[in-house]
Amino acid sequence: MAMDMEDFKFPDEEDEVKDADIEVEVDGDDVEIVVEDDTPPEDRNVEPLPDEVKEELETADTSKDYSKNVKDKFVKYKKAWHDERRAKEAAFREQQEALNIAQKMLDENKRLKEMLQSGEKELINTYQSSAELEVDKARQRYKDAYDSGDSERLLEAQEELFKAQLKLDKAKNFKPTVQIDEDGVQTTQKQVRQPAQRDSKVDDWVAENPWFIDPTKLPMRKYAEGFHETLEATYGRNFVGTDDYYRSIDNEMRRRFPEEFGDKTTNAEEKPKRTKPSTVVAPAKRSTSSKQIVLSKTQMATIKKLGLTPEQYAREQLKLEA
């Protein structure tokens, strides 16, 4: 859940400035942000000198009613005062310049990421179009092989068609490595999927299930393809091509078309094993949270000046710590 800037109050906007806990949701997980006051203890809760007192001291007439020693001290105090003011103003200008540079870098980073995302989408579309073309060609080769009556060519064409369909399915389900969130923060997919080696299993499975390449059994094949999509949606891409994957298809086909398999029955109630899910971090609590980020008031002030939210900062911080 994205956090709007209008909904969040920074520490300096609260009625009472003190340490605070903020819970935000980052990539589906609750993350606790602890805001700590990094002001030196001796400088906390110190009221600034009222403006009217400052003005009185600034305009005080030191030409009379004071001894020379006191007048000299007044002059030195004023000089120290103005030296500190000039140093503070110089530091503020440097800080503003640093913030301006940081903001420009954020804007440029976002622009480049958007360009990358746009180019990646074009690449995905091209890859998908290529995969669709391969499927069409594979289907034509399968038809030609079937018409020729050459069983060896038919098996090779079926394997090519199966591979082409898997490639097309992969293209349709591919997720961009760079995604732009609604709040403008870029996220990167960390996992890199390695192509699975299925050739030998495809050969064995097709050899054991000739109905899959039999044009007269087209309803069975369509049902198997639909069940393949169900398995992938339920158990994920990594499940496709495993022994449990093929076993699940065999069980379902025998359950759905028992007349096609005669006495060859199998345990249709057997459920495929789920691939181990990724670790899910429970909602953060102060005592047990494994995702806790500590931010100082200075960091919170900088985040505010950059136009960010604690949620955006926390997401980037977790990426750096991963």
Image: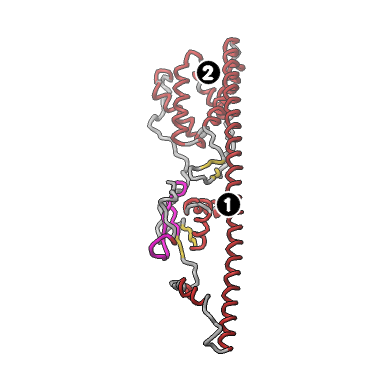
Please tell me whether residue 263 is drawn above or below residue 106 in the rendered image.
above
Q: Nearer the viewer, residue 103 or 272?
A: 103
Q: Nearer the viewer, residue 56 or 177?
A: 56
- Label 2 sits on a secondary structure element that is helix
Residue drawn at x 50%, y 14% is 215
Q: Which residue is mark 1?
A: 103
Say whether residue 266 is left or right of residue 197: left
Q: Looking at the image, which residue is at 60% across and 12% down?
A: 144
Crowding around mark 2 (Cα neighbors within 10 Å: few <14, some 14 to 19, many 20+) is some
* Image coords of residue 245 (percent x, y): 48, 32
Helix, strand or loop at disc 1? helix
Q: Residue at x 56, y 41 (%)?
A: 178
Type of amino acid under label 2: Ile
Figure check: 97 above or below 142: below
Q: Position of residue 137 (x, y in %)?
A: 60, 18
Instruction: Magenta stretch: give its range.
Output: 13-33
Check disc 2 and report the residue beneath it.
213
Compared to residue 314, the image places residue 76 above or below, namely below
- Residue 176, position as x, y percentages in the image: 55, 37
Left or right of 62 in this view: 247: left
**Residue 110 versus residue 88: which sits nearer the camera?**
88
Q: Position of residue 316 (x, y in %)?
A: 53, 51
